[in-house]
Image: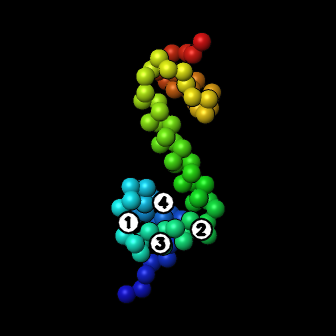
């Protein structure tokens, strides 16, 4: 049986979540890491995904804490506008 080629779409759709949760087998993990080594687009996507998850988790902390300087002001304003609030 012939192995399917690792495309960006396949890497993201089928492997990303399991990769981040350390659920890939040794061979699948090696194939995914090889794709990352060769594909700058997927490396950037992975980094953006990790940052998004981290910022999402940070947003669930105490609401009285100041917003991290890593969060873009436009994002803060968009979230507050969606909630019907404005940051002073």
State how far apart marks 3 and 1 are (Cα): 9 Å
Q: Position of residue 2 (x, y in %)?
A: 42, 85
Q: Which residue is mark 4?
A: 12
Q: Which-is-in-front pick, marks 3 and 4?
A: 3
- Which numbered disc, 1 or 4, marks the residue that appears first in the sequence? 4
State how far apart marks 3 and 4 are (Cα): 15 Å
Q: Position of residue 51 (x, y in %)?
A: 54, 44
Placement of 5 over or under 78, stated as above or below: below
Mark 3, secondary structure of its residue:
helix
Closer to the camera, 27 or 85?
Answer: 27
Q: Which residue is mark 1?
A: 24
Q: Residue at x 43, y 81 (%)?
A: 3
Outermost residue to the top: 88
Q: Which-is-in-front pick, marks 2 and 4?
A: 2
Q: Which mark is residue 37?
A: 2
State how far apart marks 3 and 2 are (Cα): 10 Å
- Which numbered disc, 3 or 2, marks the residue that appears first in the sequence? 3
């Amino acid at each position: 049986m012939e192995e399917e080629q690792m495309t960006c779409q396949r890497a993201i759709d089928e492997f990303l979540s399991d990769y981040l949760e350390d659920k890939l087998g040794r061979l699948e993990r090696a194939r995914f890491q090889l794709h990352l080594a060769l594909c700058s687009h997927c490396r950037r996507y992975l980094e953006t995904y990790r940052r998004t998850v981290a910022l999402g988790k940070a947003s669930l902390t105490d609401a009285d804490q100041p917003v991290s300087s890593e969060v873009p002001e436009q994002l803060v304003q968009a979230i507050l506008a969606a909630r019907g609030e404005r940051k002073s």
